[in-house]
């Protein structure tokens, strides 16, 4: 093996075990030194490529996708039994990374109908890094400006600490997303129009978070909080203060 071929192979495949290549490496001190340098470089490159993906990257991609969407459909797949809700956020993010030039994402048919609980839990996990610890000191006027789109008015927010309210791209359209400070942590509320074609289950949990769905006059109200949070009092408080114009 000539010098040029040896150096080329040392750069491209420094761990090559070909006998001719190994013999050329031992032919001179310069060749051994060159091969050692290429092996060290190869090792550094491998360590660089093995760096873990930053925590929350998938959720940040999902949130950006949701924020950029208007009324576009972003259906999510049904998670496999026992795997929890976080994979939903990851699945949407992977689809985005694979080069979806449009925000319409079509998923294969699920083995069972997609549920309101699944979509809501995916949103909570996906947006958690961006609203955790946020307190926008939301006023009643701001809340009702958002709720108006859904035909609802919150008559009173005394004894309630609401830290966040906005619209979000939910499923086949927008939903109201609001965060209330509960006794055990944040309680997320979604007001989802009733025409949204999602299966409804009254209560659900994944071991970290739990939720309840209440069919109200003008929308389905979803509440999600810590496993130790008592959601019933929050639901009763909200239901008694909501006035519907539809």
Image (spheres, rainbow, N blue to C red):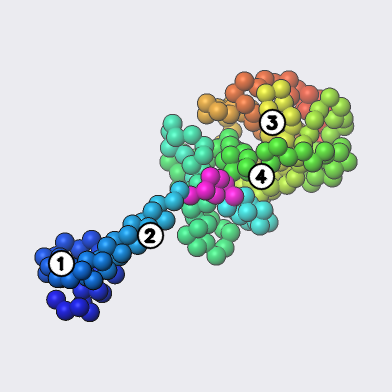
Q: Earlier in the sequence, mark 4 or mark 3?
A: 4
Asked whether residue 246 is in view, the answer is no
Left-right relation of 26 to 73: left
- Residue of label 3: 186
Q: Quadrant of the N terminus?
A: bottom left
Viewer-side label of 1, 2? 1
Q: Earlier in the sequence, mark 3 or mark 2?
A: 2
Asked whether residue 37 is in view, the answer is yes
**Is 55 inside the magenta-drawn segment?**
yes
- Residue of label 2: 45
* Residue 27 drawn at (x, y percent): 14, 70
Q: Mark 3: which secondary structure? A: strand
* Residue plotted at (69% across, 31% down): 186
Q: Mark 1: which secondary structure? A: loop
Q: Are marks 1 and 2 in contact (CB under 8 Å)?
A: no
- Residue of label 4: 130
* Residue 139 drawn at (x, y percent): 86, 38
CA gap between label 1 and label 4 equals 57 Å
Mark linked to residue 26:
1
207 up-or-down from 59: above or below: above
CA gap between label 3 and label 1 equals 66 Å
Q: Earlier in the sequence, mark 2 or mark 4?
A: 2
The crowd level at tag 3 (other Cα within 10 Å; few <14, some 14-19, many 20+) is many
Q: Which image quadrant for residue 32?
A: bottom left
Mark linked to residue 83:
none
Q: Quadrant of the C terminus?
A: top right
Q: Earlier in the sequence, mark 1 or mark 4?
A: 1
**Is 158 inside the magenta-drawn segment?**
no
2 up-or-down from 184: above or below: below
């Amino acid at each position: 093996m000539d010098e040029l071929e040896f150096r080329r192979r040392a750069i491209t495949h420094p761990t090559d075990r070909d006998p001719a290549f190994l013999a050329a490496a031992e032919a001179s001190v310069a060749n051994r030194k060159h091969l050692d340098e290429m092996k060290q470089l190869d090792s550094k490159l491998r360590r660089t490529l093995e760096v873990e993906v930053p925590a929350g990257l998938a959720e940040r991609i999902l949130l950006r996708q949701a924020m950029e969407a208007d009324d576009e459909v972003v259906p999510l797949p049904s998670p496999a039994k026992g795997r929890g809700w976080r994979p939903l956020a990851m699945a949407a993010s992977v689809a985005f990374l694979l080069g979806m030039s449009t925000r319409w994402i079509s998923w294969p048919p699920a083995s069972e109908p997609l549920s309101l609980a699944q979509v809501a839990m995916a949103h909570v996990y996906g947006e958690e890094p961006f609203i955790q610890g946020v307190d926008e000191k939301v006023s009643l006027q701001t809340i009702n400006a958002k709720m108006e789109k859904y035909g609802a008015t919150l008559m009173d927010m005394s004894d309630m600490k609401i830290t966040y309210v906005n619209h979000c791209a939910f499923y086949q359209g927008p939903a109201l997303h609001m965060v209330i400070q509960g006794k055990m942590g944040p309680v997320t509320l979604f007001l989802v129009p009733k025409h949204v074609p999602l299966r409804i289950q009254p209560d659900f949990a994944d071991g970290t978070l739990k939720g309840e769905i209440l069919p109200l006059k003008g929308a389905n109200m979803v509440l999600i909080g810590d496993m130790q949070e008592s959601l019933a009092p929050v639901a009763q408080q909200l239901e008694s203060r909501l006035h519907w114009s539809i």
